Image: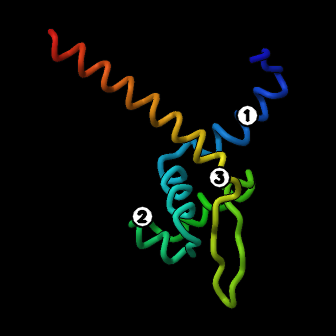
């Protein structure tokens, strides 16, 4: 792969790293990937305050990681682009491999 430019690094950090840089935002991405959900549903599932969920959704919307669609009086959130989950799942696999490796090393000592 070719080298990355300073501008690309800045954009990656701004849109992705800052966007997914909170555990609740990661959970929100996976939840809205399953099916469209509104703030009330997300608040109940995550067991966190509604203003906190709304704050995280705003950050994800600003980065186009989620899309908001109004249906009557409710707003439903869906995943902006499925590739973000593909990337996150690659990172999950990487972390799982690291943890397995560390567990293997520890079990040998």
Q: Quadrant of residue 38?
A: bottom right
Q: Is residue 30 above or below residue 85?
A: below
Q: First in sequence, mark 3 or 2: give its number.
A: 2
Q: Is residue 55 above or below residue 20?
A: below
- Residue drawn at 69 percent across, 90 percent down: 72
| Farthest bottom residue in view | 72
- Residue drawn at 38 percent across, 26 percent down: 97
User: Residue at label 2?
Assistant: 46
Nearer the viewer's eye, disc 3 or disc 1? 3
- Residue drawn at 16 percent across, 17 percent down: 107
Tell me where residue 66 appears, x and y as whole percent.
Answer: 67, 59
Q: First in sequence, mark 3 or 1: give its number.
A: 1
User: Residue at label 3?
Assistant: 82
* SS state under label 2: helix
Colour approach in the figure: rainbow
Q: Are marks 3 and 1 in contact (CB under 8 Å)?
A: no
Residue 107 visible? yes
Q: Residues within 10 Å of mark 3 (few under 14, many from 20)?
A: few
User: Is 8 on the left or on the right of 55, as rendered?
Assistant: right
Nearer the viewer's eye, disc 3 or disc 2? 3
Tell me where residue 81 appears, x and y as whole percent.
Answer: 70, 53
* SS state under label 3: loop
Quadrant of the drawing holding the C terminus: top left
Residue nearest the observer in this picture, 100 or 7? 100
Q: CA distance from mark 3 to mark 2?
A: 21 Å
Numbered mark located on residue 12 in the image: 1
Residue nearest the observer in this picture, 10 or 70? 70
């Amino acid at each position: 792969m070719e080298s990355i430019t300073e501008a690309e690094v800045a954009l990656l950090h701004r849109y992705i790293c800052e966007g997914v840089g909170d555990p609740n935002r990661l959970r929100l991405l996976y939840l809205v990937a399953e099916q469209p959900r509104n703030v009330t549903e997300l608040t109940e599932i995550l067991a966190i305050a509604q203003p906190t969920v709304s704050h995280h959704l705003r950050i994800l919307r600003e980065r186009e990681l989620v899309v908001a669609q109004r249906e009557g009086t409710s707003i439903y959130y869906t995943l902006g682009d499925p590739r973000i989950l593909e990337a996150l799942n690659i990172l999950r696999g990487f972390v799982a491999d690291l943890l397995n490796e560390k567990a293997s090393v520890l079990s040998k000592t």
